[in-house]
Image (spheres, grey):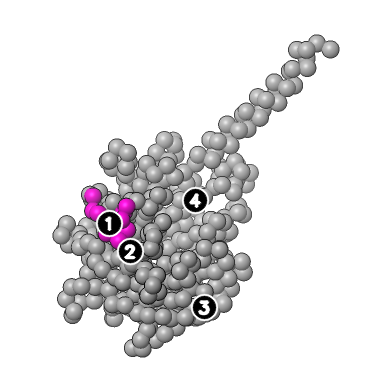
Amino acid sequence: MNMGDVMKPIRLFSLTLGLLLVGSTLASAELLALVNYESKSDQPVRREGIAIMEMDPASADFGKILMEIPLPPDLVAHHIFFNRDRTKAYVTALGIRPLHVLDLTKFPYRLRAIDVPDCQVGEDLVVSEDNRTWYLTCMGSSTVIMGDTVTDHPVKTISAPAPGDPFIAYPHGIAIHNGIDRVLVTSTEKPDMSDLGDSVTVLEASTGKVLSTHKIGSKLASTKSVPVEVVFSPNADPPVVHITNLLEGTLWAGVWDQTRKAFTFHQIDDFELRQQGMPLEMLYNAKGDRLFVTTAKPGFINLYDNSNPRHPKFLKTIAAAAGAHHSVLSPDERYLFVQNSLLNLDGLSDGSITVIDLKQDKILKSIDTLKEQGYNPNCIMLLPNHFQPGGLRAGLVGE
């Protein structure tokens, strides 16, 4: 047999394999985001949905909506959270059904309601480090719900009414650290804004036992600080949480004391010194030495050196737009995407997504796709695609 005849099928196989690998690499390079949105307040017909958008600046589809998941118009979808392995996306809502879930391993994506009878006005959700338990804050019912991540059934309702001490009142932000067996929740505000909070409550993560409540805020006693978000700083030793105070306009830290098995709290920064207000979400890079904090009014990102999480050092502000709220980093940490809208409030809902090139230190683009259609984005999360061979586009082609 001619050696050339033998080599032809080998070369053909190698070429085919190479093309498959290249195709897989290109597909895996997709930079897609889940963006839930709702009609702006001046629109005659209310509509909600989750858009899957291309966020890669190098893509021909940059800023475009690739597909949409329709939502009921009375859901008032709020935030999106992933479980630990990013196979599920939980969607909290301010409407009648406070929690829904997307199975990200099954395409096309379908939203499934989770029955949480003891929850009104679902806000934030965290998942335990072993990926077995979720914790949901319910601002309207002043409860925290623990649920099983496999069945997604609620397993425990945590309640401690004020004026008792400790107490849970209007919980919004939530953070978990299983290494010290602690969960922290913020006391933010009653949904109708008739009462405001100014504290953080500490829970035992394994049991849900309510341990202590701490006042957070240092300005006028007659003004409530309204802590809104709390997050554990990555890789901090000892553990440190950072807290944004919505109305006081400050950033605080809570430092874990291993001897006392308790936190001590102190102020880090005052955004009013930079003519900013309404600090909201916090984001860290993978290493944990950079901290990004959004302020909705007038709309900025504040960058900190977080090498010392007890005392992050302010570096600079980056302009976004009115209502600067959630932010996400691209996997290579070159691009920062900022969703600009807060609760559809007038003057705080620009409706755009600001794209910041951190390498070149400049605003790359304002994505106005939703804004131009009369919608506000409410949350942005990058869509994981490690589980989807061939990427999302392959799934779309197959449909």
Q: Among all residues in the image, which is located at the extreme top? A: 2
Residue named by callout 4 = 383
- Quadrant where the image shows the N terminus: top right
Residue named by callout 3 = 207
- Whole-angstrom CA distance, mark 4 to mark 1, is 29 Å
Q: Is 10 rendered above or below residue 157?
A: above
The mark that comes first in sequence, 4 or 1, is 1
Q: Position of residue 308 (x, y in %)?
A: 31, 56
Q: Nearer the viewer, mark 1 or mark 2?
A: 1
Residue type of the residue flagged with mark 2: His
Judging depth in this view, the residue of 219 and 30 nearest the camera is 219
Res. 258 in view: yes
Judging depth in this view, the residue of 91 and 154 nearest the camera is 154
* Residue at x 59%, y 47% (from the top left corner): 388
Magenta-colored span: 306-315
Element type at marker 2? Answer: strand
* Residue at x 22%, y 57% (from the top left corner): 298
